[in-house]
Image (cartoon, rainbow, N blue to C red):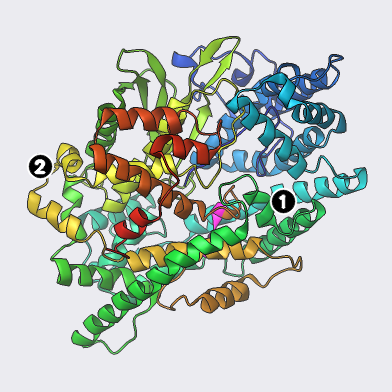
Amino acid sequence: MNTKFFFAGLLLLGTISACKTSPKTTVMDNPLLIEFTTPFGVPPFDLIQPHHYTPAFKLGMEEHMKEVEAVINNKEEPTFENTIVALDKSGALLTKVSRIFFGLAEANTNDSLQQIQVAISPELSAHNDAISLNPNLFSRIKSVYDNQKKFKLDATQTYILENLYKGFVRNGANLSKEKQENLKKLNSELAVLAVQFDQNVMSETNSFKLVIDKKEDLAGLPEGAISAASDAAKAAGMEGKWIFTPTRPSMTPFLQYAQNRELRKKLYNGYLYRGNNGNAKDNNIILAKIISLRAKRAQLLGYKTHAHIVLESRMAKVPENVFTLLDKIWAAAIPAAIRDRDEMQQIIAKEGGKFKLESSDWWYYAEKLRKAKYDMDENELRPYFKMENVRDGAFDVAHKLYGITFTEISNIPKPHPEAMAYEVKEADGSHIGVLYLDLFPRPSKQQGAWCGAYRDHWVKNGKKITPVVTVVGNFTRPAGDKPALLSLDDVQTLFHEFGHSLEGLFAENVLSTTFIAQDFVELPSQIMEHWCTEPEVLKSFAKNYQTGEVIPDKLITKLTNTSYFNQGFISTEFLAACYLDMAFHSRTDTSLLDIGKFEKDFLTGKGLIPEIEPRYRSTYFIHITGGYDAGYYGYQWAAVLDNDAFQAFKEKGLFDQATAKSLRYNILAKDGTLDPNEMFFNFRGRQPDITPLMRNKGFIK
């Protein structure tokens, strides 16, 4: 998951939040309101307290509004410089405070931050609306847009102007005063509902625990999973027992290896029914309201559906193009999933089982099928995937591609004591930026993995402001005397988010305003995943944590042979979530849905087999409340791009310098400042081809 905040002079966030009463704070007492004197100007995380945020938000909004009013009141004819650039420079304090607050609200929240987040949502929503719906500001932007030919803008300026203008239109600038008032109410309500939905998911995730007190119920589990569960129980004051939770590092090995079928089902249901338990944290009504309000908002703005609003600025453009891509892959994925299901059912029969395979059984019998077909147990890989080695492997790939280096920094404030900080430098030693890695799970952190930024690259008064990027994960912790040993999926996830960080570090935008198409944004991350399973790269970092032995060729061969294994399931569960997202947001009906019934009826109608659940069921699908609404398909859209782009390296060399340079400067450095179709064409020399994706999934030869 990638979470990015984009500021176009005004806040364009749908789920950003705002203020509540707090102790009176002077400017000098508030570390958010003075210039940071920390190494590389990173936020002074160790000094910032919850009560600092409210006055900082309020002052940030006040300053931002004054700066916007100065743009509006400029008596000169509107130009790109005095309107678009001036607007881009506004809101610096609010941007700074927002990035720090929301970065920590995701990665290290607490009751105080959650209360602030809920309380401030309507205030920031109103602030956004006051800017995006200001008729005089829009008039100046429209004047520049209508007269852009006489300003002789370059490609980047044209791209920024067109997206800024159309963004104002999508935010209601052309509506009547009465309709704008209705829009403000919708935006305010949506902002609060999104925060409530996400906080409910976190609460439900943290509250469910599978407590095991009989050692025989651990049969089949790898030692690392048992040690981690023991450590979790000790931390909860239950020494001598074992705790498993619906977080991926805890749940996945249990579903893969625990022999007790009923316990596997119990844990899986704890994951599957989050936000759907009929309690105070139930998300059914909240999501139904969100979908209804988004549909009403779309119609108010003159669009057919919410999806049409979202997709207008993306590569897909309209929902029909999304469904066409999903259908093409779905048609190949379902038969592959059915073949695997039938083979797993045969294993159950051979073992004397008298039951039908269920969704909670899939991981367990998939491992048995993998073992039977390829003599491959994923646990064979874990000893070679020590977290520190995987991290260094990602750094080494970036060094070989781009010449950059990563030097750990110890004397620097961190967003959490467990986070690691690195200075990133060019080959010539010049400073690029700071990278934080915060990789282990904790109750104060949202689930999943993502990349964000506490500060973006931009230029202020001719001076380059370097980025401060963060990669956040929920990987398996060290347990007992074992270090953190990652699964193959974890390795790919770490490389994925690291790919996002490279985009943030390499950005060369002169303005802070960028418009990254969300179905393009996963290209920089997903292309990095390809390197981590290349034999040459594996041998550089995959070393046995006990002996130092490099991963043997025999194991690499097994890994290569299983690259197509379970692709039916992997693609089907993912596509099911994509379909669900698009189905919700392609509705014209504004009535409140029965979420559970809609989900079941729609996915059954698509032909989803009952043995597979969507990767994210509706009530814990935080992507669609956190910026990926009508956008979860973007991972699959970008998969077409990244598989095709990586093919260029396969053709010219894994670390071919000319290809790497082209990727960096045509895509990573330019993303958000040029049309994505143009960027891809500049790199590949043609439009994207779906063939490499289908071949790499094993769906075609």
Q: Is residue 349 above or below residue 400?
A: below
The image quadrant that residue 646 belongs to is top left
Q: Is mark 1 on a helix, strand or loop?
A: helix
Q: Which of 490 and 68 is in front in this view?
A: 68
Identified at 56% across, 76% down, the residue is 600
The residue segment tinted magenta is 617-623
Q: Nearer the viewer, residue 458 or 81?
A: 81
- First reached walking from the N terminus: tag 2 or tag 1: 1
Q: Does the magenta run of residues contain 100?
A: no
Marks 2 and 1 sit apart, C-alpha to C-alpha, by 52 Å
Can the viewer see residue 215 in this picture? no
Identified at 65% across, 60% down, the residue is 585
Return the mark for residue 64.
none
Residue that carries the numbered disc 2 in the rendered image? 550
Q: What element carries label 2?
A: loop
| Amino acid identity at mark 2 | Val
